[in-house]
């Protein structure tokens, strides 16, 4: 009877099998309460992404679990540009319907954060905003810069693969679920340099296919566009007013303010765009730009070359050629070498023509690869020196067909023997980058606080990579010094009360620093201060300061070079006071006081302002004032330096103290 005895483990296993069977049967019963899904409905749109639904019927007299409707996306092809915005079409459908007894031309109100799937429209030329329908049509985008769509009045997540509920997104290059390797980030800074002979200048050329273009001009000048299609058709747009424009089927958002202009293009560009600046004032203007440029030249693996032997066994190789994705043609290898992201694929080798030769009674022995008789090949001399050091030149070389025998001796042969592969080019462009040019930085503050003084600026010779170099003409160098006038009168009223200065650490204790949020304008973003370097007395604190910008389309933060952020850079080091040390008096030595005042400037500068005593009293009796003397010092040698060397630091506040307080004797 041993076979009929159940163990505890066997009992548990049986119970588990019974429970599993019941669970499976209950799920089967639940699904069997529903009829089969019906056919998919017609798509709600013919283009631009719509929605389709399918229904099923509950076969039970009781309530069925689950939903009786399901959705999927459809018509996921781009609409023609003339089709217009789907939400705008729904608003304009109410133009011939009176609202409160009056007809209006309705415009869409997009990106409603509270209810993005209601049809809110604004009457043209008025502030009147009305909800004309509680729900937009299925397939309407929830937000202008998103693929998410409204279905039955609810915003549904849609990935770049056009699947409902998908979280897959495009990378910065526009590739769905891509890794960003098919494009490169381009950013830069342009500064206008006025010339009597020039009315305009080129800021930057942005090639076909670029995305997330953003330019900000600050100053009195104006931006305008020149475009060139792949067919060579050229056009121009003056960008005279604020608004949305369609230029060569690319949607442009342009904003014009009194002191700046902002240009945004989501892309991809359908033509080559050249952004230019038109000089309109005597003051300088600056333009910051950023965009993602597609990598249009890529390596493409070739087919296998002809076999090295017609019979008896040979070998054949592949190669790689540089391919222009725009023109669909092979170009010189140098275009692919321009992109560090491009890695040339290694050649592949395979055996070929293994059938025995007719005159042989057996198979030819397949020799190792390095002993094969090599194919004739093109061989070239080195390139000549470029005809120009910058701005585009030409270099040449000679190319001949050669053959190498089994001993490694090379001899020239007829060119037709090498025609199985394209002949290498004899000439090529070289040094196509721009020549170095002068770049003037911002003017320093005036060297005086009243009256006439001087201001300075740094003028650098910058190459095409933005690096400091030489080679600029001294004849065209902008001036580095000019006179300036501060309209403040050069006198101090006697009736002004003396000012008592407090130590900076006291001021620091009273002020709360506010964090700076990353925005679409390049700005300095300081991190939190480190702990004080000492636990008592006077120490120092450090923090990291970055130049960052928010990329609106991808909602990601990009680090920029420090010189692309305007305005003064926040200090990265300051003094801190942690209270008196044990047994220490609270009074400060002159050195400690100076260290505390020095925290108002950055410690990493060689030259800085410092207080050097007070002037004589303005009155001999009856009450006068003394003014603290501020000098520019070399922080290493402690020698007095020219004030122009301290223009990059903030001048310390004016300090006054009362003096000669004894009353004057009667006259």
Image (cartoon, rainbow, N blue to C red):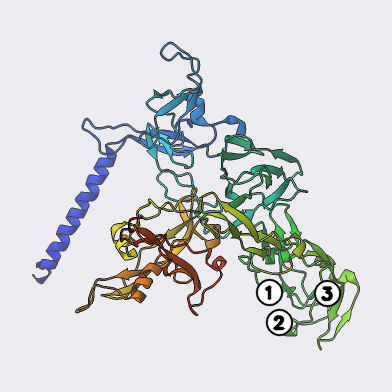
Question: Residues under labels 1 and 2: Cα distance?
Answer: 9 Å
Residue toward you, 377 or 18: 377
Q: Residue 643 at what x, y percent from top left? A: 54, 67
Q: Quadrant of residue 400?
A: bottom right
Residue pointed to by mark 3: 380
Element assignment for label 3: strand
Q: Residue 596 at what x, y percent from top left? A: 35, 69
Seen in the image, is 630 located left or right of residue 409? Answer: left
Residue pointed to by mark 1: 349
- Position of the C terminus, as image quadrant, is bottom left
Q: Which mark is residue 369?
A: 2
Seen in the image, is 209 located left or right of residue 445? Answer: right
Give the foreground label among 3 and 1: 3
Tag 1–tag 2 contact (CB < 8 Å): yes
Residue furthest toward the bottom? 407
* Residue 26 shows in this picture: yes
Residue furthest toward the top? 101
């Amino acid at each position: 009877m041993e076979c009929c005895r159940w163990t505890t483990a066997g009992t548990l296993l049986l119970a588990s099998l019974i429970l599993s069977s019941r669970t499976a049967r209950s799920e089967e019963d639940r699904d069997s309460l529903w009829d089969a899904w019906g056919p998919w409905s017609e798509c709600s749109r013919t283009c631009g992404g719509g929605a389709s639904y399918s229904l099923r019927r509950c076969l039970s007299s009781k309530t069925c679990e689950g939903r009786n409707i399901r959705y999927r996306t459809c018509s996921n092809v781009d609409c023609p540009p003339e089709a217009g915005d789907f939400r705008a079409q729904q608003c304009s459908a109410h133009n011939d319907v009176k609202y409160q007894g009056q007809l209006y031309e309705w415009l869409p109100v997009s990106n409603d954060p509270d209810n993005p799937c209601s049809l809110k429209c604004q009457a043209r030329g008025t502030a009147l905003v009305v909800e004309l329908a509680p729900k937009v049509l299925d397939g309407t985008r929830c937000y202008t810069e998103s693929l998410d769509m409204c279905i039955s009045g609810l915003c549904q997540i849609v990935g770049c693969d056009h699947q409902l509920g998908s979280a897959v997104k495009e990378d910065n290059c526009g590739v769905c679920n891509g890794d960003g390797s098919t494009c490169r980030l381009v950013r830069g800074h342009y500064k206008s340099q006025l010339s009597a002979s020039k009315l305009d200048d080129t800021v930057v050329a942005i090639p076909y296919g670029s995305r997330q273009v953003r330019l900000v001009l600050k100053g009195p000048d104006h931006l305008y566009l020149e475009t060139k299609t792949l067919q060579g058709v050229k056009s121009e747009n003056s960008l005279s007013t604020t608004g949305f424009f369609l230029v060569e089927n690319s949607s442009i958002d342009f904003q014009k303010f009194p002191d700046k202009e902002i240009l945004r293009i989501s892309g991809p560009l359908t033509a080559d765009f050249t952004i230019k600046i038109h000089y309109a004032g005597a003051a300088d203007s600056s333009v910051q730009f950023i965009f993602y440029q597609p990598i249009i030249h890529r390596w493409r693996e070739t087919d296998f070359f002809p076999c090295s032997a017609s019979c008896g066994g040979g070998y054949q190789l592949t190669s790689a050629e540089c391919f222009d994705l725009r023109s669909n043609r092979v170009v010189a290898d140098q275009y692919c070498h321009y992109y560090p992201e491009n890695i040339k694929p290694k050649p592949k080798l395979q055996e070929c023509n293994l059938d025995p030769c007719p005159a042989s009674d057996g198979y030819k022995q397949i020799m190792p690869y390095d002993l094969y008789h090599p194919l004739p090949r093109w061989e070239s001399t080195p390139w000549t020196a470029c005809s120009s050091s910058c701005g585009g030149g030409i270099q040449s070389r000679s190319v001949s067909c050669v053959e190498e025998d089994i001993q490694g001796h090379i001899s020239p042969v007829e060119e037709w023997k090498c025609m199985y592969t394209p002949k290498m080019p004899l000439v090529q462009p070289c040094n196509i980058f721009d020549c170095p040019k002068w770049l003037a930085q911002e003017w320093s503050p005036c060297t005086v606080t009243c009256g006439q003084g001087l201001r300075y600026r740094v003028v650098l010779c910058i190459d095409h990579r933005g690096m400091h170099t030489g080679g600029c003409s001294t004849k065209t160098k902008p001036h580095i010094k000019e006179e300036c006038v501060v309209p403040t009168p050069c006198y101090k009223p006697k009736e002004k009360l003396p000012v008592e200065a407090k130590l900076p650490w006291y001021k620091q204790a009273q002020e709360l620093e506010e964090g700076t949020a990353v925005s679409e304008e390049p700005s300095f973003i300081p991190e939190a201060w480190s702990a004080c370097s000492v636990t008592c007395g006077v120490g120092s604190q450090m923090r990291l300061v970055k130049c960052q910008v928010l990329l609106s389309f991808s909602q990601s933060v990009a680090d920029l070079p420090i010189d692309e952020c305007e305005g003064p850079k926040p200090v990265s080091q300051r003094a801190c006071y942690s209270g008196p040390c044990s047994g220490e008096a609270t009074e400060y030595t002159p050195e400690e006081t100076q260290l505390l005042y020095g925290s108002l400037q950055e410690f990493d500068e060689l030259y800085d302002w410092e207080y050097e005593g007070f002037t004589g009293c303005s009155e001999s009796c009856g009450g006068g004032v003394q003014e603290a003397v501020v000098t520019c010092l070399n922080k290493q040698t402690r020698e007095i330096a020219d004030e122009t060397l301290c223009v990059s630091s903030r001048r310390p506040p004016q300090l006054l103290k009362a003096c000669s307080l004894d009353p004057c004797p009667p006259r």
